[in-house]
Every structure is written in structure tokens, then in C-alpha cells.
Amino acid sequence: MKKTLLTFITLLFIVHSFSQGIVYVDIDATGTNNGTNWVNAYNDPKDAFDNAIIGDKIWIAEGTYVCQDTARSATFIWLVDSISVYGGFNGTETVLTQRDWRNNPTIFSGEIQGDNDLTNNSFTVLSGPDGTTGLPINYSLIDGITISDGYATTVNAAGTQLYRWGGGFFLSGNVRKIDMNNCSFLNNHALAGGAMNVSPSGVAAELNITNTRFEGNVASTASVIWVAARQYKKPTITIENSLFIKNINKDLGANTSGGVFYFSTNYSHSTVHINNNTITENADSNSSSTRSVFLLSRFSSASMTDLTVKNSIIYYNPYFIATVRNFSSSNFFFAADFYNCISNLNSYTVTTTLDKVYTHNPLFVNIATGDYTLQSTSPAIDSGTQVGLTVPLYDFGGKQRIYGSQIDLGCYEYFQTFASISENVNDLEVSVYPNPTSNLLNFTSNHEIDLIEIYDLSGKRINSFVNTKSIDISNYNSGVYIVKIFSDENVATKKVIRN
């Protein structure tokens, strides 16, 4: 009997293992609507979520998807462990590497009524995985999805607030770990946590966000993300290589505390890592004196937010008055450490460490047109640290993450390419001597030299020198190098030989 039962369980395991696979969703598919391939793909992600089994990978083609239920509580959600949800397909791919999520946007929208009225949209667009006490979600992946137009706030006729924190995404309950990559949060509203709210209550939660765009999200408190640690359930949040732009704090009828980020703790601890992010053009129109990019709140001596910010650019965020501050002077102490950052908000009321934090202009290419990549003379170039970090292979724009002697600040790595080698551009004339050389290179020019950069023949920047007419290359390997010389708006390019 025991042998028969064991055989039966083994067979169930084998059948279950081989039944896992790719489930297809395409709003334009015209086949049998069973998710078995692109032709017969489900038209609605809800069908894929409802029928998923443990370990399924759900591929969703480009298009705009809304919950078919018009109740404002409608949300995209799945109740099964180890589900991976990928967006960004054109509907012909056979392997994941063929996907182009940048040019094939998969959008989960809160526009359930189809009337372009934001105020009657879904409270929360995406709830993602949701477990139970007995069956927690151990892991889920969300990759290449745009979450837009959630509206987690309204007032009824009696003036009572009806809301659900997190207009774009709400993480609660029994979820142990979520990885979120290559996503966008656009135009989501909430009283607190415009883009997302993380409030673990059943188990300690880990949320890792990489290469994600947060733009145009609105809230009274925490225009982007509110992390609430309570009931002894510790959240650990890591946000890397991401862009935060034009998110707004304004009065939506509740506590107008402000903050792009708000981290609160009550009888629990939270750990937050903010690495290599660009945070700019976010605004606070509230009148609160707590107008800070990072706002921390601690309601008991048995709780702590441990915030570490590395290699990030926090620049030009109108009406904010501090980089980080305590929500209330009567609250308990926090730990907030900043390493290798740029912030022009020179107020850190709760920090314990400020190491290489500068107020310089990061020199974006063109902030007016939304180009937040770095100019060649940006002080953010090669100014980061890799200590304690696992550096991703690519930056927010999909280019090599470390290009040069050190990681750059912000979500973009400066990456110089050479279309051709030209001796002079505009009216800048430069002589380089001796060439070849085994040690010193000297420069003469008809203009003042501001910057010299050295590249190998693959286009990788090796080093840069400011305000000098002589550089030492004795520690370089023998070979040919490219030298770029900058003066005002002019640039010259030379080949040099290290013999």
C-alpha cells in the first residue's frame, strides 16, 4: 500500500512538473483562447492567472489590458506560487531573448470604465501574487509590464475617505519575495503610495526593483512608494537602476505629508537600499514642513528603518526642502546613510553617514526634453562605489553598466562611441607630443583645455583628466589609444601610441 501511494505521488509530481511551461496572452489573438501558443493565446491576463499552475511563465503580448470587472476593487492578481509574468512581446517570439519590451509595451491599465475619467478607475491596478497563512507565495517575477492609471482615492457623499493605498501596485499579506524588472509606473494616484504600497502583514517580504520607470504618479503622501513595516514583519526593499521623474505630492484629501518615498515602521524593522537611481523633476505642492524626498517615520523604539542610498542623483526636485528627514521631531531615531551621491537639497536631518555626497549639477544632456543621460563632463561619471553592491550588467538604457574606471552615478552610464576618428572639430586645434611615448603626453592648443579623456580602441573610456596639459600614461599597456580633448563647445580627437 505504501509503495502504491508513493508511486502515485511520484506520478503526480512528474505530470505536474512537465505540465509547467509558457502560457500565452495576446489581446489580438483569434484562436481557441486557451493560452497554448500565440495563435490560441488567452485574450485576458485574468484567464492566464486564474488557470496558472506553480512555476508557469506567462508571456503577454503588447497592448493595453484592463480588468473586465468594472467594480473599482477589480485588480490583476494571481494566487499561485512561483509565477513569472513577462510583458513586451510582439506575438511571434519563440524564446525570451527575442522579446523587445521597450518597443512592445504591455500595459495593465486601471481604466475599467472606458470613459477616460481617472476618478472611477480601479483602486489598484496590480496586486500581483497573493498568498495565505498556510500557503504563502515564496516567489514571483514581474518583468516588462507598464502599470498605469490606478486611482486609490475617492470621497463618498458623506465625506468619508474610501481608499486603497497603492494606485499602481499593492503588496500585502503572505508574499516572501518579488522581483520586478523593466517595468513602468505611470499616472497612478493614491492618498498614500501613488505608484505602490508595500505593507507585509503575514510574512517578511523582499521586493527587488530594477530598471523601472516611475513617472507622473501622484499622492498626498509618498508619490512613488510607501513601505509600511508593522506587526513584526520585516520588509526588505532594494531599488536599482531606476528613473523617478515628475511624480507629484499634492492634497488629495488626506494626510499631506509629502515625500517621493515614505518609510514607516511600527514594532518592526525595514531595510531599504536605493542604488544607482536618478530622482529628478519630482515636485511637492503641499504646505507641509516635512517636504523631503525621503521621509521616515518611526512610531516605537522597537522599530527601525535602515535606509542606505548609494550612487544616486537627487537633483532639481521643486519645492522639496530636504533630501531626508524625520516625519516628526517627536519620533524615534533612524539610520539613513548616503554614499557617493549628488543632491542639491543640502538637508539631512536624520542621517548617520554622509560619504562623498555633493551638490554639483550632474549635467544631464537635456533635462528640458527629458534626456537624463550624462554629458561627457558630468561630475557623476566614474564617481560611484561598488562596495556592498552586486552591479548589474546594463544601465537603465540597456548599455554596459560600468564603462570606464568606476560605476557612474544615477541610472545611466556615460558611454562614448566613436563614429569616426577626426583630427579637429569646429576650430579647436591640438598638438600631442611626444607620440609615441612611454610616459608623459603633452598637449598644446589654441583654446584652454577643460577635459582630456582616454579610450581604448573598443571605445571604452579608461580615464579622464581635468584642467591639465600633461598626462602620464606610463602605467598603460603598450598599444594604440584614442584621446579626446574638450574645450568649451569644441572637441578634438587624436590617436596616440604607448610604446
Image: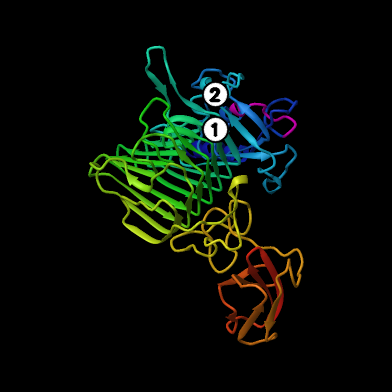
Q: Quadrant of residue 201?
A: top left
Q: Quadrant of residue 408?
A: bottom right
Q: Nearer the viewer, residue 167 or 353?
A: 353
Label 2: which secondary element: helix
Which residue is at 56% across, 19% downward? 69
- Write down the residue under mark 2: 118
How far apart are the two marked residues, 1 and 2, measured between alpha carbons?
9 Å
* Image height of 229 relative to 311, above or below: above
> What sort of colour scheme is used for the picture?
rainbow
**Mark 2 Cα within 10 Å, few/some/many (few <14, many 20+)?**
some
Q: Which mark is residue 134?
A: none
Residue 62 locus on image (x, y percent): 68, 35
Q: Nearer the viewer, residue 236 or 134?
A: 236
Which residue is at 36% across, 59% downward? 354
Residue 1 in view (yes/no): no
- Write down the residue under mark 1: 187
* Image height of 370 relative to 59, above or below: below
* Image height of 477 relative to 490, above or below: below
Which residue is at 60% across, 25% downward? 66
Label 1: which secondary element: loop
In the rendered image, the quadrant that contains the C terminus is: bottom right
Residue 46: in magenta span: yes
State which region is magenta.
38-47
Residue 3 in view (yes/no): yes
Residue 336 locus on image (x, y percent): 34, 52
Amino acid marked by disc 1: Asn
